[in-house]
Amino acid sequence: MLFGVPQYIDVEDKIAGPLTAKQFLWMLGLGGVLIVMWNMFEQTAFYVIAIPVSLLFVAFAFYRPHGVPLIAFVGYAITFLLQPKIYVWRRLPEEQRVKRAQKEEQFKTQFYKKSTSMDPRDIAALADVLDTEGMHQTDRAVEILEKQSVQKTTKPPTTK
């Protein structure tokens, strides 16, 4: 094989034992928040508040609903809740619809040309060039390739 293809590119590097950098930072954040809460609250209140806060930080660090980190999932939920849910369709003016139809027609004629059928001998000549990796080229194969390159370079201009 000429080039190695990278594998496991979606796996994050482990930096602190079994933890990735993001997980480690979430755990450090949890430790910082717990230290601040220990100094702010009495012991009973600290335990009552620390358990849900710890669960929240652990969920942000490790839980991945549908393969997405929980923090991104929450961000998507907030974005969804804040976006308007109603789309009102307004018909384009006649002149814009005509322009759009002309552009679509131009696109179709430019890219959906009817394919020209090739002679089986032409296909055999091109296959021979491919099989020999370009070392053995017949005049017919060179003619076909030049014809194809001329067709590709003479595209009609696009209007904007």
Image (tube, helix red, strand yellow):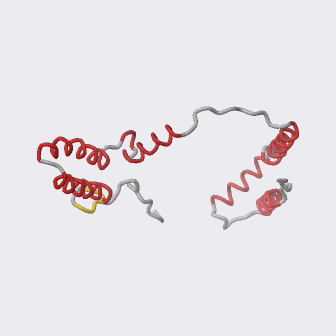
Q: Is residue 93 left or right of residue 33?
A: right
Residue in front for this viewpoint, 30 or 94: 30
Q: Is residue 155 visible?
A: yes
Residue in front for this viewpoint, 7 or 38: 38
Farthest residue, direction bottom = 135
Residue in front for this viewpoint, 93 or 133: 93
The number of callouts visible is 0
Q: Tell me where residue 158 appears, x and y as whole percent.
A: 83, 54
Q: Tell me where residue 83 appears, x and y as whole percent.
A: 55, 39
Q: Tell me where residue 151 appears, x and y as whole percent.
A: 82, 56
Residue 45, compared with residue 37, is above or below; it is above
Q: Going 23% across and 61% down the picture, which residue do you hit?
A: 16
Q: Is residue 114 visible?
A: no
Q: Going 78% across and 33% down the picture, which residue do you hit?
A: 91
- Position of the N terminus, as image quadrant, is bottom left
Q: Is residue 136 left or right of residue 144?
A: left
Q: Is residue 91 left or right of residue 69?
A: right
Q: Going 84% across and 41% down the picture, which residue do you hit?
A: 96
Q: Going 86% across and 54% down the picture, which residue do you hit?
A: 156
Q: Tell me where residue 146 appears, x and y as whole percent.
A: 80, 62
Farthest residue, direction left = 43
Where is residue 51, by image quadrant?
Answer: top left
Residue 60, compared with residue 157, is above or below; it is above
Residue in front for this viewpoint, 149 or 9: 9
Q: Is residue 119 left or right of residue 134?
A: right
